[in-house]
């Protein structure tokens, strides 16, 4: 495994925790207390950190790797809520409920710092400043949920896909506007199925908005007409 020989025997770096938005500005003694309570755990690529419906016991901080937070229904339909990168704190919303309402999956070998719910609640009871920070983080998550629900409820798949492409395209050395995210990942992020994304991309190709470029086993999406894509994103 990528991190197997890098896990230190002691706690995480004090400076790493201190620089995280959720903990910045706290007195050094409190940060030291948080650091003392933390444990390190390694999750191999493809392993669940927790599953939807699990009893919530810990708060997690990603030190290295990448984690996907998603929901899945009984029919297997998947909705990716966000991706956690290094320094990301997750399971915060579920921490205040009995059960996790999302899944957390390691997309890469991941090194995760964990603090138990009991120890964290003890610290929070003495630190209103930290409570305020956590409430701010929760508010941002609620806003994200609200935006996702709004998009799925009120916007068509072509509109959502066009908006997504506008957010993710980047210029390569040839100044091409490319999106390298797979169709399966796009479907998960937009709360629909891969077949629907494939059909929508085909219609966009026919309308001269994009083209698909072979790239190994997958295909990149190249934007040909950005103005048409903007219009489509607005439902015009």
Image (cartoon, helix red, strand yellow):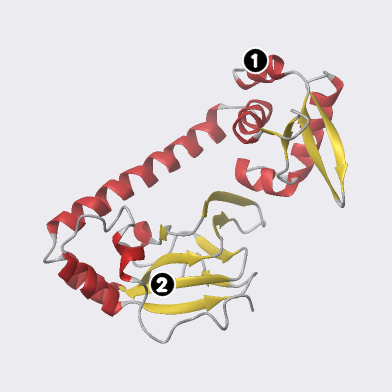
Above-or-below relation of 80 to 97:
above
Q: Nearer the viewer, residue 217 or 27?
A: 27
Q: Marks 1 and 2: which is nearer the front?
A: 2
Q: Which mark is residue 155?
A: none
Above-or-below relation of 43 to 75:
below
Quadrant of res 38: bottom left
Q: Is residue 95 visible?
A: yes
Q: Which mark is residue 231?
A: 1
Residue at coordinates 52% horizontally, 77% vertically from top-left?
Answer: 42
* Image quadrant where one finds the C terminus: top right
Picture coordinates of residue 131 (x, y %)? Answer: 20, 56
Q: Residues within 10 Å of mark 2 (few under 14, many from 20)?
A: many
Q: Is residue 57 visible?
A: no
Residue at coordinates 68% horizontally, 14% vertically from top-left?
Answer: 227
- Look at mark 2 in the image and give the residue it sits on: 113
Picture coordinates of residue 26 (x, y %)? Answer: 19, 59
Q: Earlier in the sequence, mark 1 or mark 2?
A: 2
């Amino acid at each position: 495994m990528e991190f197997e020989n890098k896990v230190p025997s002691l706690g995480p770096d004090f400076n790493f925790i201190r620089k995280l938005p959720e903990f910045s500005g706290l007195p050094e003694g409190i940060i030291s207390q948080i650091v003392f309570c933390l444990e390190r755990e390694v999750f191999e690529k493809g392993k669940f950190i927790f599953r939807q419906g699990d009893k919530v016991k810990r708060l997690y901080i990603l030190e290295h790797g990448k984690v996907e937070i998603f929901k899945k229904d009984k029919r297997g339909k998947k909705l990716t809520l966000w991706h956690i990168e290094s320094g990301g704190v997750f399971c915060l919303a579920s921490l205040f409920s009995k059960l996790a309402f999302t899944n957390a999956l390691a997309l890469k070998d991941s090194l995760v710092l964990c603090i138990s719910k009991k120890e964290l609640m003890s610290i929070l009871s003495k630190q209103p400043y930290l409570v305020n920070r956590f409430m701010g983080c929760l508010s941002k998550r609620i806003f994200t949920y609200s935006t996702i629900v709004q998009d799925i409820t009120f916007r068509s798949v072509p509109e959502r896909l066009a908006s997504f492409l506008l957010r993710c395209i980047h210029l390569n050395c040839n100044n091409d506007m490319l999106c390298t995210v797979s169709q399966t990942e796009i479907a998960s992020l937009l709360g629909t199925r891969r077949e629907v994304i494939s059909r929508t991309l085909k219609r966009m190709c026919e309308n001269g908005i994009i083209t698909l470029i072979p790239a190994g086993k997958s295909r990149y999406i190249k934007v040909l007409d950005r103005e048409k894509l903007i219009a489509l994103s607005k439902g015009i």
